[in-house]
Image (tube, rainbow, N blue to C red):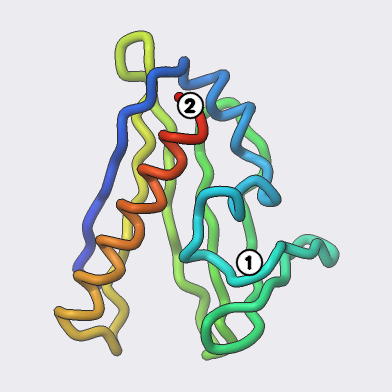
Amino acid sequence: MLPSRTLSVSINHSWQALYEWIWRPEYFTKWASGLAESDLRKEEDLWLADGADGPIRIRFTPHNDHGIMDHWVDTGSGSAIAIPMRIIANGDGSEVLLTLFRQPDMDDERFSADVKWVMRDLKTLKSLIEG
């Protein structure tokens, strides 16, 4: 088992409307700076991009009625990194939750830096939606 942290941000927008706005993979690059260093390019059922250490392949959960936005990032190391993501109702607004798993090669400092990066990205998403 990998240690994990579930990070979240509250957004003043209904969860269904928020999901419909942001579920498309090509929207991720507007707010998720940690995902890729280039625009995403679709190739069959995968999305390709440039990552910090070279080309990456990303698989996204298809559009659904449950606010699930899971994705898997393959950096070419042989195994994909799972990134569970959900949008759920929080009163009249939404809660966006993303679980970050500490990878076996990460030390405490690197994992802490990733947590801070993801929180910065979630706050960017909030700013984009709320203005």
Q: Is residue 3 left or right of residue 83?
A: left
Foreground pick, 54 / 99: 54
Which part of the image, by quadrant, shows the N terminus?
bottom left
Task: Kindly identify which residue carries mark 2.
Answer: 131
Q: Residue furthest right?
A: 44
Badge 2 local density, few (<14 within 10 Å), some, or many (20+)?
Answer: few
Q: Residue furthest left?
A: 108
Q: Residue furthest top?
A: 92
Label 2 or label 1, whichever lies nearer to me, is 2
Residue 123 visible here: yes
- What type is the residue that disc 1 sits on? Ile
Badge 1 local density, few (<14 within 10 Å), some, or many (20+)?
Answer: many
Circle count: 2
> What is the x, y in percent for residue 91?
31, 11
* Residue drawn at point x = 15 percent, y = 79 percent: 108
Task: Kindly identify which residue carries mark 1.
Answer: 58
* Residue drawn at point x = 59 percent, y = 26 percent: 65
Secondary structure state at the residue bearing disc 2: loop
- What type is the residue that disc 2 sits on? Gly
Q: Earlier in the sequence, mark 2 or mark 1?
A: 1
**Residue 59 drawn above or below residue 67:** below
Residue 60 location, quadrant: bottom right
* Residue drawn at point x = 41 percent, y = 34 percent: 126
> What is the x, y in percent for residue 124?
43, 44
